[in-house]
Image: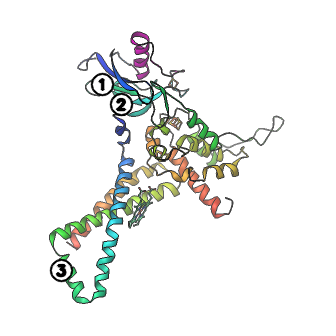
Amino acid sequence: MNKAWRSRNHPAYWAFIVHRLSGLLLVLFLPFHFWALGRALHGAAAMDGFLRWTDQPLVKFAELGLVVLLGAHFTGGVRLLMLEFLDWREWQKALLAVATVVTVAIGIVFLVHVA
Amino acid sequence: MTSTSDKLTVRVWRGAADGEFRAYDVPRLPSQTVLDVVTHIQRAIDPNLSYRFACRVGMCGSCAMSVNGVARWTCRTHVDKVVDGNGELELGPLRNLPVIKDLVCDMRSFFDKWASARGYFHPTRNRTDDLERISPTSRARKRADAGVECIGCGVCYSSCDVVSWRPDYLGPAALNRAWTLINDVRDGGRAERIAAVAGDSGCHACHTHISCTERCPKGISPTASIAGLKRATALAALKGEL
Ligand code: HEM
Ligand code: SF4
Ligand code: SF4
Ligand code: FES
């Protein structure tokens, strides 16, 4: 029915969407990550070539995306585990805000130190 | 009413699952509830419209509908709070339940699941025994109190995506009821109830979307109750009781 999507417009549901999307994107990224680590087995030259490739701005930007994705999925996952395994308390409503802040902080730290 | 129009354009679901929305013009009044709007349509425009209500004061749980896409108790939902800026109101039956006609759903699957979750009291005493003394400050009593005011309106059930995804899911209301009984020290059905809610269609199917808690008109958090069941069933499994 037409307006049914409105029912889902609340913070915890958006958190679920972020969690599922980040989880699926990480699944796609993981094989690539292992392939990259596998380059090291082909010797220093191959690895260095790969690392030079990762120095490009666009690749760096994609890396930032991945780090934020992992940050969002990790903090969101810890939030869920806390909600489900600790006794329910009022302060847990703030967990979503904490998860968001930590995710942004992870992104900034990555930007400052790596990029 | 000042700037807002003195007329509501109300689109109401007519028919069963293959029905359609039909538009009605309804006069806008101060302190008007959504249930008032539906009643006006039935009494003044179209006597063939089917809907449910009984108490009109938020106790019986029979008047829930989808109001502009969101499940609500209609007797205590003011039009001012939910109407769109252009004076439009869309009223449909609850989601996740078979539509019988217009705004009336078949609630059987909803209540059958309360029974499947063993959401009924299992007495351990008879009338000649003393009354159980339960401290209002005990942890179990507080946990039961948090969920016990449920009126069985189905708003949470209708708002839960897990119910849409897997129709055998027991759902937030039945699981909330099970949790209040698990915390009732007078009840003797704990082991069976833990087993009843531990399965694939039980508490572990919940993804903590919190839509149920967001929408419950009684301010209950079925999500918190389900989290309690997740812990209780996990503990029972660890102890080898499941
Ligand atoms: C870093 C630590 C991580 C934590 C704490 C974590 C936590 C969680 C939790 C609690 C869930 C269940 C969500 C629910 O009930 O709906 C989940 C789902 C999921 N996770 Fe993770 N996870 C982590 C890392 C990862 C990684 C590295 C990947 C990908 C390779 C991943 C992929 C997924 C996927 C695809 C789902 C299913 C999403 C859904 O059901 O909506 N997770 N995670
Ligand atoms: S918290 Fe669980 S029961 Fe409530 S709406 Fe979400 S998935 Fe459904
Ligand atoms: S838990 Fe709340 S929303 Fe669900 S049936 Fe009970 S009163 Fe209605
Ligand atoms: S008519 Fe009884 S709760 Fe609305």
Within 10 Å of the Cα at label 2, are there few (<14), some (14-19), or many (20+) other Cα atoms?
many
Q: Which mark is residue B88?
A: 1
Q: Are marks 1 and 2 in contact (CB under 8 Å)?
A: yes
Q: Is disc 3 placed on a helix, strand or loop? A: helix
Amino acid type of the residue tagged 1 in the rendering: Glu
Question: Can see residue B27?
Answer: no
Give the residues in magenta: B32-55
- Find the distance from the CA under tag 1 to the CA under tag 3: 59 Å
- In which quadrant of the rendered image does the N terminus of chain B lie? top left
- Find the distance from the CA under tag 1 to the CA under tag 2: 9 Å
Observer-nearest of B98 and A94: B98
Q: Are marks 2 and 3 in contact (CB under 8 Å)?
A: no
Q: Which chain does tag 3 point to?
A: A
Q: Is disc 2 placed on a helix, strand or loop? A: loop
- Labels 2 and 3 share a subunit: no
Q: Residue at x 49, y 44 (%)?
A: B163
Q: Which mark is residue B28?
A: none
Note whether B24 is above or below A12 in the view shown.
Answer: above
Q: Are marks 1 and 3 in contact (CB under 8 Å)?
A: no
Within 10 Å of the Cα at label 1, are there few (<14), some (14-19), or many (20+) other Cα atoms?
some
* Horizontal arrangement in the rendering, residue B37 relative to residue B173 (left or right): left
Q: Which mark is residue A52?
A: 3
Q: Which mark is residue B68?
A: 2
Q: Can you tell which quarter of the image residue B43 is in?
A: top left
Question: Can see residue A33?
Answer: yes
Residue B129 percent location from the top left of the image: 82, 38
Q: Is disc 1 placed on a helix, strand or loop? A: strand
* Mark 1 or mark 2, earlier in chain: 2
Tell which residue pokes out farthest to the right in this image. Answer: B128
